[in-house]
Image (cartoon, rainbow, N blue to C red):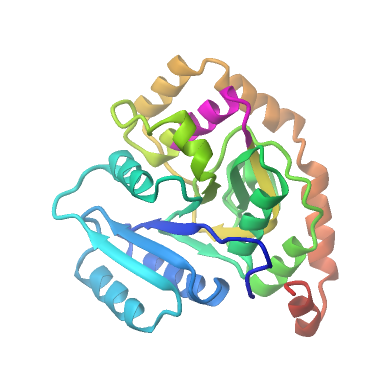
Amino acid sequence: MSEAPGIHLPIILLPVGSDDDALDACLGALDAGTPAGTRIWLADDAQAGPRGLAIIERWLTRTHLQADYTRRKHMLGEVAHMDEMFKACGDMDVVVLAADAQPLPGWLQQLASCFARDASIATATPWCNAGEAAAWPRLGEVQPPPTDFERTAAACAAMPPTHHELPAAVAHAVAIRGHARRKVGDLDTSSYATWYAALIDLSLRFSGLGWRNALCETAFVARGGEGLSTSEDMDTLNARWPAWHPRLANFLMRDPLHAAREKLRHLYSDVGLPERQRELFK
């Protein structure tokens, strides 16, 4: 899974959570599905407990990724912590990965290729079993993670990269274009308590300036469940973006990704032997 010529991989930002088992599974999936030497920043907002710290320490000694780990002495808060990470990255493209996510093979190369194909894309969101608008196999439903990561990844890699528009990026994993992020400004750390809501707000600000929030049909990142927000955050979104919920409802009713999900289902059924799967990543 080498990096394609001319494609620069973004930095992975992983806000460390308090679920030790999910963190362990996430780091294992990252090692299995991400090219050696990829830059990744594990940023701990005073969340990891003793077992989590031991998992991170052990992983740092053996990972083939170019990894950095930082830990705050006192909790800053989810959105403020993410904003701090963005500022440290400047104009560089990043991928924010949920702490309980499990990326499938080839995921990062596919997200980088999505950006390379279309300069108007500000955010690229891969498929997910719990991906809301980007959910597969069924829209808006939480399904168990795929049982066969290689087969699912191979089917995604064979998808036509049409990059349908999403109502907003989804928090399981999202690639964010650096110079677009700098143009729209910082995250709203005073209005939102959750990254889930701050990401929707950021996505809608991108749309307001003519950028696109796109689906990366060729990548998949699994997750145990959907992201969470607070009722206060949802009230703020509704007040600031009154067209947001009608837009989302219209998307769910029209289901413009139905054909794409069916295409992926057929490709998944057609994926054959492991040798054929590996060919799809070359």
Q: Is residue 148 visible?
A: no
Locate residue 101, reporting x and y percent.
48, 60
Locate residue 122, reporting x and y percent.
58, 39
Residue depicted at 54% across the width and 77% down the height? 32
In the image, is residue 117 above or below residue 191? below
The quarter holding residue 258 reads top right
Residue depicted at 31% across the width and 32% down the height? 189
Q: Is residue 167 left or right of residue 38?
A: right
Residue depicted at 75% across the width and 75% down the height? 282
Q: Which SS type dominates the magenta stretch?
A: helix
Locate residue 206, reporting x and y percent.
55, 30
**Residue 208 magenta:** yes
The quarter holding residue 8 reads bottom right
Locate residue 278, reporting x and y percent.
74, 79
- Between 192 and 279, which is closer to the camera in this rendering? 279
Residue depicted at 49% across the width and 69% down the height? 38
Q: Residue furthest front?
A: 6
Q: Which residues are magenta?
A: 199-212
The quarter holding residue 250 reads top right
